[in-house]
Amino acid sequence: MRTFEKDYEYLLLNLIPQHRLGLERRKHLERAIRDGEPADMKRAAVHALEELCKVGYYRRADTQVRQEHVLLTYVRRRGRYQVKLQIPVADWLSLGATAQDASPPAVDSATGPVGVDTTFNILPHLIRSLSINDRRESTFDRLESIMRLLPEWLSVWHGRLMLNEERFGVQENRGSWVFTLPERALLKRAVYERCRRSGKTEFVGLPAARALGIAEPPLSSGLDRSRADAEVAITPIFSLGDFWGILEIWFSRSSNGSIMRSRVEVATGMIEQVIENTVRLENLTSVDKLTGVYNRNFYDAQVRIEIERATRSASKLSMLILDIDDFKRVNDTLGHRKGDEALFLVADLIKKNLRKIDMAFRYGGEEFVALLPGTSEEEAAHTAERLRAVIAESDQLRDPAGGRVHIRVSIGGAVYPDHATSEEELFAKADSALYRAKRRGKNRVEFYHES
């Protein structure tokens, strides 16, 4: 590993990514570079490095007090260089008093107590780092990154995040710190169900955790199983009004109780905020703006996930394709604005008459797709008929004179793996059933069957 001993201007310009810093910190940095005072640039560098430690870009590897100076060593995560700075003790102690964004930890050890103020400063830096430029990283990946760094950030032994598979809807189902389970399996243990119902955190000692069947952290976490000197905090994760999963945080029972509670709150807040931010970001790119249901791009990604999930769980996946009958006539006689209203109305009625785990997509034009996980042909046929009926019976659309305009849809359905072995074949079979419904008079439901 290389140790850089360049001047401070080089450090500020080349080794500190300013785009990862807050606005005020960047201003201080630019001012220090512009003024050119070595002492100011050194202080600005320490402030910036401390902030970058909180978002996981750097790690403070060593802090040594030498009479009137403090020697600080920072290591770039996953990098091959380190930065060493020596500053007066007075400057180091003043960081917490003069810089809200760079309060130094009270103890550098990963197992020692961390100040509550420092702990709470993690959240804004983390959220700011998850910007729209990182849209390629999935919610699952972001949560895995957070959980990986959680022990160091909060000075705990281990963390584990169990997500509700139905709510989360991701292709990956297991990481090192994060994994997904069906809600029924997730809430099988009474303590998890109790936490979900109450919305509160429960603290359980190691013997009780063993009795409850809670999996212990790996040996690498530092847990001393011979002393039972451990406790686990079990807390529910809620975001956007829904239950998303259970978070477990393991720590030493000798830790300060109030500090540990605050750390659990910080971890919970980080996870819930990341879920909310990422879901909102995904909605910007995966939701059809006109109708409010998912768009074609999201369908292309999600249908593969649902096929894999159905295969893994040996369950069925039903697909419905809905097409508005005579939609061109609606546009031609009532105008395109009324045509848009018809599209929105149909999409809204589809959403309102599906289960939470079902998904509706605007596939293109006046065509919609609904995916029904774990649904047989008989159950899917009931759902399709209900959708057809509620749309046909709706009288919300009016012509320019105020008269009622009734919309009709034809629906075709197919079931994986009964009718198809791939997502392409499943769509083709449902599409074939849709055209049979059109040929047989429209405003009806048909499922694929070999002719």
Image (cartoon, rainbow, N blue to C red):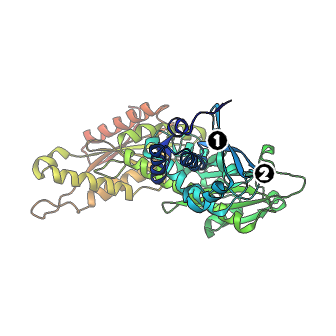
Percent position of residue 98, x then y: 56, 60
Q: Residue 90 in the image: state x and y as whole percent.
A: 66, 57
Residue 248 shown left or right of residue 356 in the figure: right
Q: Going by the image, does 65 lie left or right of 439?
A: right
Q: Which residue is mark 2?
A: 216
Instruction: Name the quadrant containing residue 58.
Output: top right
Q: Quadrant of the C terminus?
A: top left
Tag on residue 40? none
Image quadrant containing the N terminus: top right
Residue at screen point 74% across, 67% down: 257
Amino acid carrying mark 1 in the image: Gly
Distance from disc 2 to disc 1, alpha carbons, whole Å, reads 16 Å
Residue lying at 62% horizontally and 59% vertically, measured from the top left: 94
Q: Is residue 443 left or right of residue 76?
A: left
How crowded pointer 1 is (Cα within 10 Å; few <14, some 14-19, many 20+) is rated as some
According to the image, label 1 marks what residue? 175
**Secondary structure of residue under mark 1:** loop
Mark 2 in CB contact with mark 1 (< 8 angstroms): no
The image quarter containing residue 80 is top right
| Residue 231 at x, y percent in the picture | 78, 60
Asked if residue 320 lies left or right of residue 257, the reply is left
In percent of width and height, residue 205 lies at 80, 62
- Residue type of the residue flagged with mark 2: Glu
Q: Secondary structure under badge 2?
A: loop
The numbered mark, 2 or 1, whose residue comes first in the sequence reads: 1
